[in-house]
Image (cartoon, rainbow, N blue to C red):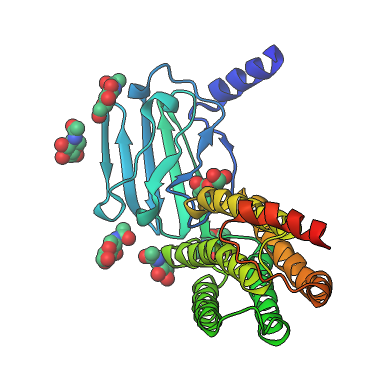
Amino acid sequence: MWPLVAALLLGSSCIGSAQLLFDKTRLVEYTSCNETVVIPCFVTNVGAQNPGEMFVKWKFNRTYIFIYDGSRNNSTADSNFSSAKISVSELIKGDASLKLDKADAVVGNYTCEVTELSREGETVVELKYRVVSWFSPNENILIVIFPILAILLFWGQFGLLTLKYKSNRTNRKIILLLIAGVVLTAIVIVGAILFIPGEYSVKNASGLGLIVISTGIVLILLQYNVFMAAFGMTSFTIAILITQVLGCVLAMVGLCLCMFACVPVHGPLLISGLGIIALAELLGLVYMKFVASNQRTIQPPRKAVEEPLNAFKESKGMMNDE
Ligand SMILES: *[C@@H]1O[C@H](CO)[C@@H](O)[C@H](O)[C@H]1NC(C)=O
Ligand SMILES: *[C@@H]1O[C@H](CO)[C@@H](O)[C@H](O)[C@H]1NC(C)=O
Ligand SMILES: *[C@@H]1O[C@H](CO)[C@@H](O)[C@H](O)[C@H]1NC(C)=O
Ligand SMILES: *[C@@H]1O[C@H](CO)[C@@H](O)[C@H](O)[C@H]1NC(C)=O
Ligand SMILES: *[C@@H]1O[C@H](CO)[C@@H](O)[C@H](O)[C@H]1NC(C)=O
Ligand SMILES: *[C@@H]1O[C@H](CO)[C@@H](O)[C@H](O)[C@H]1NC(C)=O
């Protein structure tokens, strides 16, 4: 350590007006998620004791955009870069990094010139813009696939309802289910179109909101009504509905955490919620196709059940009847 310092001191005293040394960063990137953009400029061999002995100039495309005059403690910024500033308290540690609002940031080469007493130096940093997708490609696919799958499974259940459970349902209920199903499908398609992969935006976020809220909540209501129209509640259908509510809660919590986050770290939570909703729809379809339809041929349950809890008790009563 000491030999190095000695060598540096010796070097600077020998040469006289010596160079300032920089921790060289050639390139920095920013994305739509950076609210402020920091263009780094670190001097590694600062000798000044206070910022009054330092002078910093930032240049963009051969024009000075920011000047800090330590002797007058005065910062001036070009009108195109009005948010430009440096941290005067960090300057003494060698940090002359330029901070800009994202709105003022322009891609290109920035030159940092630092003068300290008789020493000076400069470094060039290129600022680039990088386009980042809100969710990763795989997450994008799953977020759209699971709701579409869940809706297709709902239509499967609806088909079974119209074909297999003719005697139990009323036409009015079928028509209401049909309308609700068509509206849901339309909303999810609109949501998926708004949600096309890209940078985080209000459009993207509202697309995600439409998809998740509609599949989460509407599908539970539809599934409940399909079960009621077909054969009422059994312990199995209650278990399926509970699973679906769980999936909905996970998806909603995930949505709240992702919706306003430029970098969504809770994507997996949201996706697992959507996956569970699709699974519940699948179980409902399988149950209607194989289990409940067989049960029905043995004993058509014509008991009107209004509430899931009553239904649960009655389904037990039903089994005793058998
Ligand atoms: C943009 O933000 C990222 C993550 O916060 C950060 O690592 C990066 O340095 C920022 N870029 C600029 C140019 O400030
Ligand atoms: C910077 O200068 C180059 C040519 O020297 C020019 O092509 C470019 O448009 C300039 N950029 C800005 C933002 O003024
Ligand atoms: C320099 O000016 C800023 C305000 O522009 C002030 O906050 C800071 O204390 C001043 N520093 C010195 C060393 O005078
Ligand atoms: C800094 O200097 C400029 C002129 O060079 C002047 O217009 C401005 O008022 C000064 N600012 C401060 C805070 O002294
Ligand atoms: C500032 O913006 C104006 C108009 O947009 C442009 O003509 C001028 O060259 C810009 N100055 C710098 C330093 O980029
Ligand atoms: C910045 O400078 C580098 C190296 O000199 C050059 O390759 C690059 O094209 C420049 N970028 C812009 C935007 O002018």
Residue 264 visible in the current orientation: no
Q: Where is residue 269 in the image (x, y as percent from the top left)?
A: 65, 50
Quarter containing the C terminus: bottom right
Query: Residue at 45% across / 52% down in the picture?
Result: 110
Query: Residue at 51% across / 50% down in the picture?
Result: 256
Q: Where is residue 228 in the image (x, y as percent from the top left)?
A: 62, 68
Query: Residue at 50% across / 39% down in the picture?
Result: 41
Quadrant containing ligand 2: bottom left
Decide if residue 205 is on the left or right side of residue 320.
left
Residue 111 visible in the current orientation: yes
Quarter containing the N terminus: top right
Q: Where is residue 120 in the image (x, y as percent from the top left)?
A: 46, 35
Q: In this view, does 161 lie above or below 28?
A: below
Depth check: give the residue in front, 312 or 209. Answer: 312
Q: In this view, does 322 lie above or below 98?
A: below
Residue 225 falls in image quadrant: bottom right
Outermost residue on the bottom side: it is 163
Decide if residue 199 is on the left or right side of residue 276.
left
Decide if residue 180 is on the left or right side of residue 77.
right
Query: Residue at 53% across / 66% down in the picture?
Result: 218
Outermost residue on the top side: it is 2
Decide if residue 66 is on the left or right side of residue 215.
left
Q: In this view, does 292 lie above or below 274?
A: below
Depth check: give the residue in front, 20 or 104. Answer: 104
